[in-house]
Image: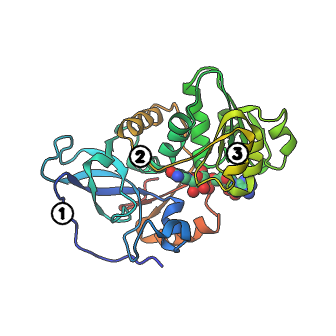
């Protein structure tokens, strides 16, 4: 259960900032923590202020912080184990904060950290994507998949194939990823066995056997959660890597600049006031949200 209530604003400790929050990106980990799902429970003691992603202005600066000043336009990620971003003020370590360009806007900025860093790290840190390689993105119509497909353009001659339901094959998605296959189309996905150098499986455990079969011997399979059947991967000569949540200021600032100059398109944004967080969670859990939900602390910008 989520309650909207008053509490005292936090004070920054050494090395910390307090940010006056303008917008909050909603992630599935938020409602998983709230609902006590096993996989998320360990990361938070309840009751808690939920939320990881935020954008706003620096409100106060703790001792020893040299990189930020009051009034700076910032976005970032709270530590999942500490008090979160579903609030008007958030206290956060200054190392988990980055600057974003004014042309982006706080709503767009707040949508980015978790989904964009996941996509970036999946490709470049864990996936080791290199020029000329073939990548399969299973779940390309989702928030992470859509960004991953666009980040692939940074590497020359990469062939990207996306997997998603035909109901998601919009013109925009075809522009992002021209080659799309339905998840049920097992034979086309695995085609000539093991033909992808990198497979990013955002569709969960149910798709894992197909994802393994689609990865070439010596290739990499990147999954957001730990792999279910590591033995199957080893038997096929596939290296499986699970995505860790990592903050990276430099990468986040690069991504924000790409978004600000229109070099990447963000998913559709569903914007609600913070007081409606419970409704947004209910929609997310029922899978009635198309795109990325962002909560705002002030008036909804139209
Ligand atoms: N470890 C990390 O750092 C990290 C960070 C971000 C996300 N994640 C994880 O990465 C995954 C993807 O995140 P996201 O934000 O991109 O999620 P999302 O926006 O909800 O996208 C998921 C996509 O997968 C599709 N999908 C789900 N189940 C499907 C199925 N059985 N068959 C066909 N399509 C299916 C959905 O289609 P429909 O909408 O039609 O169902 C949607 O297009 C999630 O598991 C999330 O928890 C991990």
Q: Which mark is residue 282?
A: none
- Element under label 1? loop
Question: CA separation, marks 1 and 2?
Answer: 24 Å
| Depicted 208 relative to depicted 128: above or below | below
SS type, badge 2: helix
Residue 109 is tagged as: 2
* Residue 297 x, y percent position in the rendering: 36, 62
Q: Dots 3 and 2: beta carbons under 8 Å?
A: no
Neighbor class of circle 2 (other Cα within 10 Å; few <14, some 14-19, many 20+) is many
Return the residue nearer the eye: 174 or 273.
174
Query: Is 46 positioned to the left or the right of 211 in the image?
Result: left
**Residue that badge 1 annotates:** 11
Give the labeled residue for mark 3: 233
Residue found 32% across the figure and 42% down from its top: 98
Which one is earlier in the sequence, the residue at label 3 or at label 2? 2
Mark 3 or mark 2, whichever is nearer to me: 3
- Decide if residue 80 is on the left or right side of residue 279: left
Q: CA distance from mark 3 to mark 2?
A: 37 Å
Q: Residues within 10 Å of mark 1 (few under 14, many from 20)?
A: some
Q: Is residue 169 visible?
A: no
Q: Residue at x 82, y 35 (%)?
A: 193
Question: Residue 282 falls in which quadrant of the image?
Answer: bottom right
State the residue in front, 50 or 23.
Answer: 50
> Circle 3: is it few (<14), some (14-19), or many (20+) Cα within 10 Å?
many
| Vertical arrangement, residue 9 with respect to residue 201, above or below | below
Residue at left offset 48%, top offset 70%: 41
């Amino acid at each position: 259960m989520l309650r909207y209530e008053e509490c005292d604003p936090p004070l920054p400790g050494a090395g910390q900032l307090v940010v006056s929050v303008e917008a909050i990106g909603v992630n599935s980990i938020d409602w998983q923590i709230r609902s006590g799902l096993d996989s998320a429970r360990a990361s938070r003691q309840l009751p808690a202020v939920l939320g990881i992603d935020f954008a706003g202005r620096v409100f106060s600066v703790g001792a020893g912080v040299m990189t930020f000043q009051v009034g700076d336009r910032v976005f970032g990620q709270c530590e999942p184990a500490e008090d979160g971003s579903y609030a008007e003020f958030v206290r956060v370590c200054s190392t988990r904060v980055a600057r974003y360009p004014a042309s982006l806007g706080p709503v767009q900025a707040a949508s980015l950290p978790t989904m964009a860093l996941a996509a970036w790290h999946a490709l470049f840190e864990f996936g080791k994507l290199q020029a000329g390689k073939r990548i399969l993105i299973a779940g390309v119509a989702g928030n992470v998949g859509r960004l991953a497909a666009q980040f692939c353009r940074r590497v020359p001659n990469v062939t990207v194939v996306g997997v998603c339901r035909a109901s998601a094959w919009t013109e925009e998605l075809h522009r992002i990823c021209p080659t799309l296959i339905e998840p049920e189309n097992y034979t086309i996905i695995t085609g000539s066995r093991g033909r992808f150098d990198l497979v990013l499986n955002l569709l969960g455990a149910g798709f894992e056997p197909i994802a393994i079969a689609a990865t070439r011997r010596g290739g990499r399979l990147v999954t957001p959660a730990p792999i279910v059947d590591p033995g199957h991967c080893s038997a096929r000569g596939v290296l499986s890597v699970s995505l860790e949540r990592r903050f990276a200021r430099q990468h986040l600032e690069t991504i924000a600049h790409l978004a600000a100059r229109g070099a990447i398109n963000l998913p559709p944004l569903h914007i609600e006031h913070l007081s409606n967080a419970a409704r947004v969670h209910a929609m997310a859990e029922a899978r009635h949200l198309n795109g990325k939900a962002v909560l705002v602390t002030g008036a909804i910008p139209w």
